[in-house]
Image (tube, rainbow, N blue to C red):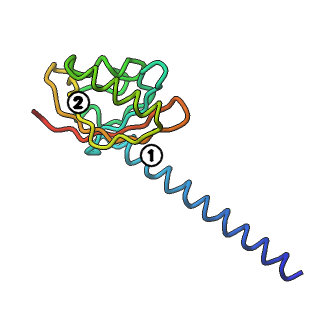
Amino acid sequence: MTSKIENIRQQNRQKAGRLGQMQAGIRLFDVTFNNPDFGLLVVEFDRQTSEFTHVSMSCKKLLGYDQGDMIGRKNYEFIHENDIKNTINESENQLLNNQESSGFINHIKKKNGDYVRAEWFSAGGNDFKQVAYAKIKKL
């Protein structure tokens, strides 16, 4: 009987730990996606269509776009034409080889037409959603 009770306690501790991890994930999502002053651009895009599905509120401060200006549009619409080929190669490498991207650099067009340098970090995955974040630097 004691071992059965101990097993139940252990299972409850494990469930509580998973719940704590989920709550931490929710807080992290809130900080990164719903904070207009966050210093990084965070995006999610569909690998099949190359369309943005989520964009952090920081896009307004960093690039001048409202979230609605970017969501549903192709990520390549915002990349400097000289960087498109390398960006496609990097994306394909991640998708085909399930590899991380760390420090990949391209240039993103701001709403006013200027370009900024974006240093991207993301992890590969098995689904068609890609979450990535970029440090943005003025040229």
Q: Secondary structure at mark 1?
A: helix
- Residue at x-position 56% and y-position 61%: 20
Q: Distance between the Cα atoms at labels 2 and 1? A: 25 Å
Residue 81: image quadrant is top left
Neighbor class of circle 1 (other Cα within 10 Å; few <14, some 14-19, many 20+) is some
Residue visible at 23% across and 30% down? 106
Q: Residue furthest front?
A: 97
Q: Position of residue 107 (x, y in %)?
A: 20, 28
- Amino acid on which disc 2 is placed: Asn
Residue 112 tag number: none
Q: As rendered, which of 107 and 67 lies closer to the eye?
A: 107
- Determine which of the numbered discs, if any, sits on residue 106 in the image: 2
Of labels 2 and 1, earlier in sequence is 1
- Specify the quadrant that holds the N terminus: bottom right
Q: Circles 2 and 1: CB distance less than 8 Å?
A: no
Compared with 90, 85 (above or below) is above
Percent x, y of residue 139? 9, 33
Which residue is painted at 47% across and 38% down in the image? 98
At horizontal 43% and vertical 46% (from top left) the residue drawn is: 30
Q: Quadrant of residue 120?
A: top left
Q: Is residue 83 left or right of residue 26?
A: left
Closest to the observer, 77 or 20: 77
Please, what is the three-letter code of the amino acid marked with disc 1?
A: Phe
Question: Which residue is situated farthest in the bottom direction here?
Answer: 2
Mark 1 sits on what residue? 29
Q: Secondary structure at mark 2?
A: strand
